[in-house]
Amino acid sequence: VHMVESGGGLVQAGGSLRLSCTVTGTIFEIDRMGWYRRPPGKQREEVALITDSGTTTYAQDVEGRFTISGDTKKKSVYLQMNGLKVEDTAVYSCYVRQNKWPDVRSNWGQGTQVTVSS
């Protein structure tokens, strides 16, 4: 599975960024895509997910500020991040889950750095 992520960068607090991810090399149908992040010195955490039916979920601390969009059939996912805070600084990785029960495969991309300055 190959993922191309883009859109990270340095932004001031209150600013916006838009992350993009396209996926190739999958074998089975994708049933969900999304974004995870790893803040400095912390564990990876889920940020937002979108399913093949269009259902979206968000981590509590980004809800209302971040918007996920995309299309699992087109193998692309986006994350619009508004009202960025210093604590949003992290490496953001694209996520994809392929599902052909009982074979379920999850993959994460290399990530793109998002740095929010005060």
Image (cartoon, grey):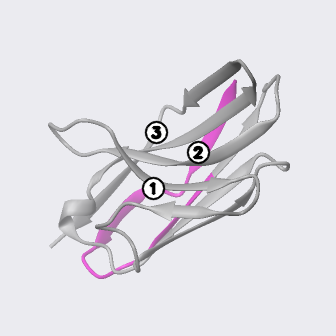
> Which sits in the foreground, 18 or 65?
65
Magenta-drawn segment? 1-20
Q: Please, which residue is most extreme toward the front here? A: 102
Magenta run includes residue 31: no
Quadrant location of residue 114?
bottom left
Residue under the image location 27 percent in, 75 percent down: 12
Residue under the image location 63 percent in, 46 percent down: 33
> Which sits in the foreground, 82 or 95?
95
Looking at the rendered structure, the secondary structure element under dot 3 is: loop
Contact, CB < 8 Å: mark 2 with mark 1?
yes
Magenta run includes residue 17: yes
> Which sits in the foreground, 108 or 110?
108
Q: Which residue is mark 2?
A: 5
Q: Which residue is mark 1?
A: 8
Relative horizontal placement of residue 100, taking residue 108 as reference (left or right)? right
Relative vertical location of residue 46 with respect to residue 25 in this rendering, above or below: below
Contact, CB < 8 Å: mark 3 with mark 2?
yes
Residue under the image location 70 percent in, 24 percent down: 1
User: Looking at the picture, which amino acid does disc 1 mark?
Assistant: Gly
- Which mark identifies residue 111? 3
